[in-house]
Amino acid sequence: MQEDNPWFQKIAANRYTPPYSGIEKHSDGNPGTTGTAFSRLVATIFLDDISIDSGALNYVPGSHLLHFDRDDPNYKSPTNEEILAGDFIPAELKAGSVLFRVPCVWHSVSPIKHLRRYISVSYTIRGPMSSWDMANVMELVEKRKHIDLAGIPEELRELWVR
């Protein structure tokens, strides 16, 4: 991200109890539009083993590169139809693994047949970003204005305030 002081966007604790159908193929970007390269990063800490047979994270290597601004002003990032047609491959992960990813990489989750828990932490740059990303950030900034900073650990406050 080349960011000395990234903005702490979100933390989420996720728990999927089987049977669960999985998560459809998607990108966390805004399909059809481009954004600033590497303006967001997600770190995911897996609390359970993730196998190919149960809850594998599936992704398309390099697909995140298709969502970034180009020199061509007419370039549009992939559509939902193109994302769905991607060549997804599964990844097995052991409990305790930490996965760093750019949110716009195309990904999905296979059907879950055993408990799947993980924690995701999202960071965003403080510099230029797409209008879609900026709208999301500004919505969070407005919500955070009503949260007492005393409830935020001191070591996170610098990352919390935009």
Image (tube, rainbow, N blue to C red):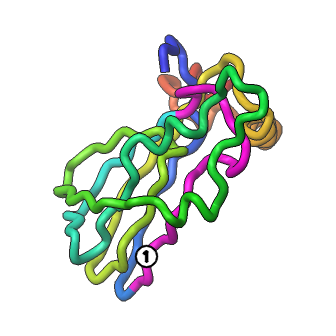
Q: Please provide the residue range marked out in magenta.
A: 20-40
Q: Which residue is mark 1?
A: 22
Q: Position of residue 44 (x, y in %)?
A: 37, 47
Asked if the magenta segment contains residue 62, the reply would be no
Q: Nearer the viewer, residue 110 or 80?
A: 80
Q: Position of residue 40 (x, y in %)?
A: 55, 33
Q: Residue at x 48, y 14 (%)?
A: 2
Q: Quadrant of residue 151?
A: top right
Q: Residue at x 47, y 42 (%)?
A: 121
Q: Residue at x 31, y 71 (%)?
A: 55
Q: Position of residue 119 (x, y in %)?
A: 40, 52
Left of 37 or right of it: where is 18? Answer: left
For mark 1, give the secondary structure.
Answer: loop
Identify the amino acid type marked 1: Gly
Q: Nearer the viewer, residue 61 or 96?
A: 61
Is residue 8 placed above or below 45 in the rendered structure?
Answer: above
Left of 2 or right of it: where is 118? Answer: left
* Residue lying at the far bottom of the rendered structure: 19
Q: Quadrant of residue 74?
A: top right
Q: Residue at x 60, y 32 (%)?
A: 68
Q: Nearer the viewer, residue 157 or 85?
A: 85
